Every structure is written in structure tokens, then in C-alpha cells.
Image (cartoon, coloured by chain):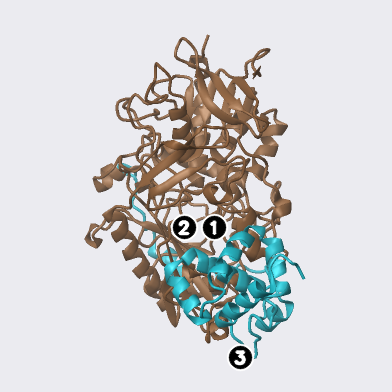
Amino acid sequence: MSKVFGDWERATLARLADLLIPAGDGMPSANQAGVAGPGLDEVLRLRPDFESPLRALLARFAESDAQLTVVSLQASDPDAFFLLTEVVAGGYFLNPQVREAIGYDGQRPVPIVPEDPPDYEQNGLLASVIERGPIYRPTPGTP
Amino acid sequence: MTDNGFNRVPDVLVVGAGASGAVAARRLASDGFDVVCLEQGAWPDYSRARAPYPDFELTAGRDWSWDPNARQAPADYPVDDSQSDITALMWNGVGGGTVVYAAHWQRNLPSDFRVRTLDGVADDWPFTYEDLEPYYVRVEKDWGVSGLAGDTAFPKSQGPPLPPPPLGAMGRRVAKAHNQLGWHWWPGPNAIATRAYGRLNPCTQRATCLWGCVEGAKASVDRTYWPVAIDRGVKLVTGARVKRLLLGPDGLVTGALYVDRDGREHQQRAAVTIVCCNGIGTPRLLLLSADDRHPDGLANSSGLVGKRLMMHPFGTVVGLFDEDLESTHGVWGQHIHSLEFYETDASRGFLRGAKWGLQPTGGPLSMTRAYPWGAENPIWGSNFHRDLRKRLGRSAMWGIIAEDLPEEENRVALDPIKTDSDGLPAARIQYRMSENSRRLMAFHQERAKESLDAAGAYETVIAPFIRATGWHLLGTALMGADPARSVVNPEGRTHDVPNLYVFDGSVWPTSAGMNPTATIAAVALRFTEQLIALRREQRVSA
């Protein structure tokens, strides 16, 4: 595990993260999914630009009541809230078990099959649009 | 300082390698012109496109941010937008904005060229839809546009060369609703290849078009135009930031002074210069080129350089459905578009209109963000898992491109304090949404909500207004016949300097309510062929 963030910073993040993404509906909480552990390391590897502002944010709230922190941050500092939620949710959705549980396997390719009949032709879908005729205003003076 | 024109003077210098610069350079080279293009940025690095990887959503904004102030790449210049309702977005590199655009390929409508005549406001364009139509047809072939001929919102014309992408479950659902409402819809036209076409590969519907098309299916001009132009002899110089245009004693442009990424200055001479730097960069360069003879900036005797900035206020409405619409995927891009409320109906309380494009909503991280879902609809906390399931793959959204009318108070100027990395004054923009724009947007958001309600959405969200939507930068070097009231003439030539041209969206008299690339490209081709046709009359510096 990276030493970039110390135990107290990870503990602070874990408290905040579990308020944002608690366990439920058969899904792990953010902390259970490793968001404050290896998830944080991976997020910071991918987004090193997050490190400095996240460190400052966690320092601000190390001693605070986590519930109050999250509620107040969203209203008082939307940019900081966005950073926190990107780190937490970003790390959460990098977890392969989470991705499998929500049925999301990434932005996989879905090739267009040229042989498939066009779906805009199904059941005369365009017929009423065509039947209605032109809807534009022509250039003045043109037929 | 080096002088690249010491031994020979190219026929044409193009400044900027985005859509209009690419069209001009390729067409000129095809007729044997000797062309040099100076581009301040680099070629896009598609190895940084992360669509195939689990971290795509997390890293997309890292390497493919649209905001130069956030990106702060070496080629970017700051844009002070503190006095603007909308943030100016751009890509400074080969391909320009087409590298990160959504590739919605929308021709303007006939009424867009006759706003004064039909609606009594703003200005008419100096040419008509019918004048431009043949150029639309040609650039659509060069671009590899996909779509379907016969759209009833447009005059009859030849269709694009490729079939449209599938409507998909969400497109079919909304299309059926529009049929019930009696509202227009049509398969979405996109500059996205649905089949292998030229240098383009077929789209695989990853819905990652705006953050580096990993398949090479999106028609950005770094892929479609520049390789052809270079094959035909165009010299494209990257990392070349133009500091100012140079003038001869006869008042004609002799070329440009630029600085490379190592800080060395060069002169690039040319007989004719075409500026293609977008609606912010073009006026910035003309203003940077002020001298004793032109204290208010080059080609600015009208005082209009930088004024009438238009950026298209943008709205989004999302619907939640009880069916898997597979809306994590698709083209992004648009699956269908609607122009039902595009034309003016003064009884609505505003003039002009907007185009709607139906888009996917993305992966799970996108489901958590305040845009488009709204801070008042937080996903966080005890309902996180329930709300994620409600949104992921089961949502669809209309993107609304609203026409904003030109106002001289909305403008680009040089920043008196901030500079870019080469010490050149940054751009400063001032832009306020008009009452007409606000009414227009509110009306369209409500109609888009009705559309999704009719499609069976059990919940709809009108996305909060956000500033970071200024993809379309238009109007700041007005085209017109009167030198006292415009910057360039109807052929794109500046009234003040006979061998200086502007070919980008800066010349637009009005903004239309369409994504602008199709018209930027068609106008650039028209301008280029007019320049070629009149080449024997072209004045050049001695």
C-alpha cells in the first residue's frame, strides 16, 4: 500500500466514504470495497492531480463529525465535494466485484452489424414523420 | 530568429489546424497551392484514450478535458471567463475542437441564414442555405457523415454517405413517443462512421466519443483531412504559436511571427494568410496584431473584432425508465434528433429555437455526478445502491442547443494581466445570457421533459445550468457586405487587409441553434473555392 496517505487520512476518508456509499442491497460499503485502502492508491495513481487537494480536504475534516462534514460540504464547497465523491465513487467502481455486482463491464465494444435491418424502419416508425411533410421555413423567394 | 520564407514564399499560410483550417488546406493543396499551416498544439495522443479500461470514467477528464483553463497544456492559453455566464471550451491541437466534439452533424436550416428577414432581429447571412447546400453535400462525403436522407426538417438534399447508427432501445422509445405527440424526430446525423469509410473504422458504440475515440471512428479532421492534406503537400508545423500577423509597408499581410515550443521565434511568410483559430483565438490574434497603423487591432476598422460572441446556451433533460435501455452505450453522438421547436413562434415569448439530440448517459460514475442529475437529487447515502440501479442503463437524455442572438456587449478582448506561457496576453471573455435565451431554454426544457414523459419516463430531471458548456465559439469577426458594419466580406476576406482571410466560425452573423461544425466546414470550403476562383485578382504583398 502506498505511503502517500497515512493511517489517519485513510481513516478520515473511510468515515466519509461509508456515509456516501453505505453497505446495503447486497452491496458492500465504500470502505468494505477498499476505497480508503488499495482503491485510494489506484485512484491516485490514475489521478495524481487529486492528491494535493484531497490531502487538504482530509486535513480540514480529520476531527469533524463525518455526517456534518458531508452534508455541509455539498452546499458550502461543491468543488471539494466533487473531488471527494470522485475519489470515493471512482475507487468503488474500480473494484471488480462491485462492477460485476452491478452488471457493468465497462465501455465494451458493441459493434454495429451491417446486416441487421435498420431499427428506424421497424413497424413503419418513420411513416408519420414523413407523412406530415416538411416543417422548415423556406428561404424567402424560393419555391 | 529564423525566416522560413527566406528562400520561397508559400502561397497560403493557414493559422490553426481545426475544422476550417483543415478544409482550406486540403482543398488548396488539391489545386496545387503551396500551403503552410501553423498549429500551436500537437497531434492528439490516442494512446491516452482509455475507453477499453476500467478507469475510463475516472481518467477521461484528465487527458481529454475540454476546458483550457483546467487542462493547462503547453499549447493552451488562459481564457478569463470570470465575467461570463458560460465557460469557453476548446482543443488546441491538430484537429481543433473536432478532437473532442460530440460529432453531431447538423446543417443549418434555411431560416438560419435569413434571421433579419424572417424574424426581424439580428442579421441575415450574405448567402442562403441553397448557396451552401452543395458544399454541405461535399464535406459530408469528405467527413464520412452517417445519417438518413429525407429529414423533413430540411429541404430535400442528397443524404450523407453512411447509414445512421441504430436508434437503440432509448431512441426507439422516444421516437414512438414523438409519433404519438405528432412531433418531429429523425435518426441522428453524426460525423461518426457506421461502416469502414476511408481512414475511419466502424463505430463500436462505446459512448466515449468526447474523450478520445479509441476506435478511430469519429471523424475528427486530424484523422480525415490532415493526412490527406499532408499527402498533397501541405506543410503542417505543430507547436507553433503565432504571436502576431506581420504587415508590409503596403498594408498587406506578409505572414506571421510565431514561437516554437523551445521558445525560438520564426517568421513564416506567405502571399495570403487565413486565420482559423475559433471564435476566441481568431479575434485574440487580430487584436494581438495591433500596431501603430492599427492601434485597435488588425482588420478592426469596424470596431467589431471580438464583439458579438455567441456560445449556445446548453440544456439537458434526463428521463428515468423502468426498462433497460442499454444507455451506458451507443454513439455520443446522438441517436435521434428533433427540430420540432426549432423555428420561431413568437407566441412562445421568445424568438428563434433549439435543436435536441438524444444521447446515452454513460457508466456508473456518471450516475453519481451533480450534472446532469442535480445536486437536489443526491445519490449519496442510504439510497445509493437503489438509485444507481435506477439510473444506470435505464436513463436517456436530451441535449438542447439553444440559439443565442448576437449582442456587441458579449465579446472577446485581450486580458490586461494574464498571459500565456509565451507572455502573450490571454483572452478575456464577457458573456451574459439574454432574456430571450433564458426564455427559450426554459421553454425547450419543459418540452423535452414532456417528450420523455410521453416516452414513459417515471421521473425526469431538468439538469442544473452549468457554465462549462461553451463548445461553440462563434460570431467575433462578423461577415457582411458593409465594411463599416463587418470584419470580413461575404468571401471571408477582411475588408481592411485584402490578403487576410478568416474562415472559421468567427464570421457567423447569427449562431443558429445547431452544432456548428457542418456549417463551419461547408463555409470554409465555399470560401476556399472562392479564393481559388479569384486568385488572379488576389493582391499580395510586394
Within 10 Å of the Cα at label 1, are there few (<14), some (14-19), or many (20+) other Cα atoms?
some
Vertical relation: B17 (above or below) B466: above
Compared with B89, B235 (above or below) is above
Identity of the amino acid at label 2?
Asp
State the cyan chain.
A
Q: Quadrant of the N terminus of chain B?
A: top right
Q: Is residue B33 visible?
A: no
- Is B501 positioned to the left or the right of A2 in the image? left
Tell me whether circle 1 and circle 2 mark residues in contact (CB < 8 Å).
Answer: yes
Classify mark 3: helix, strand or loop: loop
Position in image of residue B7 (x %, y %)? 68, 12
Q: How crowded is mark 3: few (under 14 residues within 10 Å), some or many (20 or more)?
A: few
Q: Nearer the viewer, residue B465 or B295?
A: B295
**Residue that sits furthest to the right in the current view:** A1
On what subunit does the disc labeled 3 rest?
A
Q: Colour of chain B?
A: brown
- Do callouts 1 and 3 point to residues on the same chain? no
Which chain contains the residue that carries disc 1? Answer: B
Amino acid type shown at disc 3 = Asp
What residue is drawn where x is 31% and y is 45%? B115
Q: Mark 1 points at which residue?
A: B148
Which residue, given by chain and number where applicable, does mark 2 sit on?
Answer: B151
Q: How far apart are labels 1 and 3 at the CA level? A: 44 Å
Q: Residue at x 31, y 59 (%)?
A: B438
Instruction: Say if residue B273 shows up in the picture.
Output: yes
Query: In this picture, is A133 found above or below B6?
Result: below
Nearer the observer: mark 2 or 3; the answer is 3
* Residue B424 point in image, percent of width and height: 51, 32
Could you confirm whether marks 2 and 3 are on the same chain? no
Mark 2: which secondary structure? loop
Q: How crowded is mark 2: few (under 14 residues within 10 Å), some or many (20 or more)?
A: many
